[in-house]
Amino acid sequence: MKVHVDPHIRDTYRVFPAEGRGAYLRYDMNENPEGLPAAFVQRVLREITPEFLATYPEPSRFLGKYAAFLSVQPENLLAVNGSDMAIRYLMETFGEEGKEIVSVAPTFEMYGVNASILGYRHVTVPYDEALNVNVDDIVAAIGPDARIVFLTNPNNPIGNVYTQDEVRRIADRAEEVGAVVVVDEAYHYFYPESFVQYALTRRNMIVLRTFSKLFSIAALRLGIIIADPELIGYIRNAKLTFDANSVALLFAERIIEEPGLTEELIRIENEGKAYVLQELEGNGYECRDCRGNFIFVRTKKDAHRVEEILREEKKLLVHAYRHPLLRDFLRVSVGSRAAMERFLKLFYEAESEA
């Protein structure tokens, strides 16, 4: 017996992350290689009682505290099950079958995946050989059928950033055709320039934040949508009733309450990045500071062979690319100086063996 399958879902090509990563040193998915301080994690875990786990999530208390943390109002915020879910909600709410979403390429793959699932056309603006993208080309790509423009700032994987003037130009053009602009600030704390104020003052601007990167709770899945209250209301209509889970909300609340924790996490990451870039460049490697918690390094040997040796022999994961512009690079997640010392030792060994 044949069952009906939505043709957009049937024809979507997916590549899911590899599992079984627990036995490896993980520098491949822009996670914090070491995570939050162990004592802090244990202290929060003691608050999770059987009664706590038996109760449905109530995000309002966290959102009130997070609003104060960001200097916005609670009605500007929506908590969801990670930025992946935020992207799906936004595309369901503001997209239209057969119409267009616009992004640069390469970028976060879930923009294209969700476009395929929902039956949208994905218009991409390519980078040039120098790994730059022309904002004029982005503006030109926003045609009358555009419904959503996605800007990741800094972009993953290449790490370019947008100026205030560039985003205003993009938002103005999107407004002319009735499209929304989504600025994904997953890596905000590694690059402090933000467009949150645009999300508070423009009716076609939305900003995304995540607790997976700096705040190091990727396992718990928590993303935040920041927008005008009217837009938040539309997105809430699309949202599952119980979305962000209680454990994620508790950890996020304690993270933003913990004195000095945000600043210390930023300091640790910045120290590790500065160290690894200095060491690699001092040893003759071409590197790119991607403005997030990751870097690019151009390997001296075949990048895919080096990645394979690291994975199979050194039990260390990094990210290699098939994209023609990126095939000579490895993307390496950044952590503390100690984490980067571990990476460098094994990386140099793999390069010598490739």
Image (cartoon, rainbow, N blue to C red):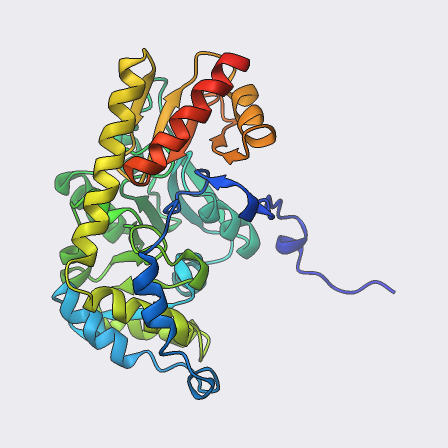
Lateral position of residue 258 relative to residue 158, left or right? left
Lateral position of residue 168 relative to residue 32, left or right? left
Across and down, in percent, residue 189 comes to: 22, 48
Q: Which residue is pictured at 88% across the width and 65% down the height?
A: 1
Across and down, in percent, residue 144 comes to: 35, 47
- Kindly give the residue lying farthest to the front in the view shown: 39
Q: In front here: 289 or 167?
A: 289
- Kindly give the residue lying farthest to the right in the view shown: 1
Residue 195 visible (yes or no):
no
Residue 227 vertical position relative to residue 102 in the rendered view, above or below: below
Residue 63 vertical position relative to residue 169 in the rendered view, above or below: below
Q: Quadrant of the C terminus?
A: top right
Across and down, in percent, residue 284 comes to: 32, 11
Residue 73 visible (yes or no):
yes
Label tally: 0
Q: Which residue is pictured at 18% across the width and 42% down the height?
A: 169
Q: Kindly indicate the quadrant of the structure image that contains residue 15.
A: top right
Q: Kindly indicate the quadrant of the structure image that contains residue 131.
A: top left
Across and down, in percent, residue 71 comes to: 11, 66
Q: Which residue is pictured at 55% across the width and 53% down the height?
A: 119
Q: Kindly indicate the quadrant of the structure image that contains residue 165.
A: top left
Q: Which residue is pictured at 37% across the width and 17% down the height?
A: 129
